[in-house]
Image (cartoon, grey):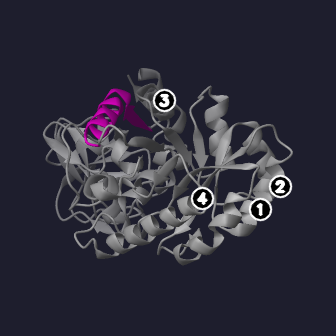
Amino acid sequence: MQQAQISSPGWIEIDLKQYAANLDSIWTTKPSHVGVAIVLKDNAYGHGAVELGRVAEKKGAALLVVATLGEALELREAGLRSKILILGERHPAEVESCWKNDLAICAGSLNSLQMLNRSAGAAPGRGRVHLKIDSGMSRYGLRWSDISRLAPEIASLKNLEIEGVLSHFAMSDEVDKSFAQLQLQRFTEAVEHLRAGGVNPRFVHICNSGGLLDLPQAHFNLVRAGILGFGIYPSKVCRRIDGLAPIMSVKARIAATKELEAGDHVGYGMRFTAPQRMKIATLGIGYGWGFPRVRNQGAVLIHGKRAPIIGGVSMDAISVDITRIPEAQPWDDAVLVGRSGNEEITIHEIAELKNSVSYDAMTAWRARLPRVYLR
């Protein structure tokens, strides 16, 4: 911990103990027959896929879910032996490596299935595939209305094990669940047509975190937990569960302090002018580290108090007003996301500064910020 602070002006702390507690909370909020797939794509949304994958594996995750072959191989090379599913579509050049490393592949078109079937014929065993159904999001997948016609042909692909069938909700975390209910109906009918045509998947899954919380009738026998595992709810209106808390804190240190006179300017473009004598602090990170490029918006926490951001955030500097925090000194910690005393800055606040969503805010932190894992 101390070494990470010394070597970098900013860092991210990931609380693995709280992550394990979050998974326990998720495990206890679902029926016993429903497994949990843990989504670790994009380096576990910036938290660290390998470290979180190890915790999830110990907890008994049914699947670890990623988005690229490289992400899957990173987990394998780190020694994780859990079942791994890669979302999206795979280029033919990637498929041999998928089979070799015991990876399950998503497929959402008949052409993809036929290509995978040919490739799996040259590999030992059968290739594990999760069939994607487009139930209304219109990204990947076979259209739900085509499944009754295609089911016998899918069943005839003897080199493939259709290990799973999945879809994805377009809007599961809002009060209005009408479209989610329509998607669920379409998906349910598609699964029934597959089974009638001779396809009997081990896993059936459509629920993301929002569906896991609010659509118990859609759990089938597997749910996918991504953002929820990190202690972040997908929306303000989702059901809450006991024991869940954020596991990510983003911190930096005060690199310098300065006294300003009335009329002094701060930062590029002179976006802030001191109205009176004041004291400011500069942190050694900025938008080049993943913080939003804002002007005179937001705050950081220093000694449990909010220090408003003044001027424009630079690539490697953020200036804050510490006039009301006289005890602040160079090399003191500043919290950009997380708690200090009784105050908290959430990832949702950072998302608002970016005019975006919490998913974007979490994944935007750069590799320049070392991850420090608290055990």
Residue 22 lies in the magenta-colored region: yes
329 and 62: which one is in front? 62
Would you say the residues marked 1 and 2 are in contact, meaning their CB atoms lie under 8 Å apart? yes
342 and 224: which one is in front? 224
Q: Give the amino acid at mark 1.
A: Gln
Residue 26 quadrant? top left
Residue 160 in the image: state x and y as whole percent: 71, 50
Residue 131 - label:
4
Q: Give the amino acid at mark 2.
A: Arg
Residues at marks 1 and 4, CA–CA distance in whole angstroms = 12 Å
Q: Residue drawn at (34%, 40%), measured in percent from left and top? A: 249
Would you say the residues marked 3 and 1 are in contact, meaning their CB atoms lie under 8 Å apart? no
> Mark 2 or mark 4: which comes first in sequence?
2
Q: Which residue is mark 1?
A: 114
Q: Give the amino acid at mark 4.
A: Leu
Residue 332 in sight: no
From the viewer's perspective, tell me whether residue 347 is left or right of residue 49.
Answer: left
Q: Which residue is mark 2?
A: 118
**Viewport quadrant of the N terminus:** top left
Q: In the rendered image of this protein, does residue 191 appear above or below residue 219?
A: below
User: Which dot, 3 or 2, sits closer to the camera?
Assistant: 2
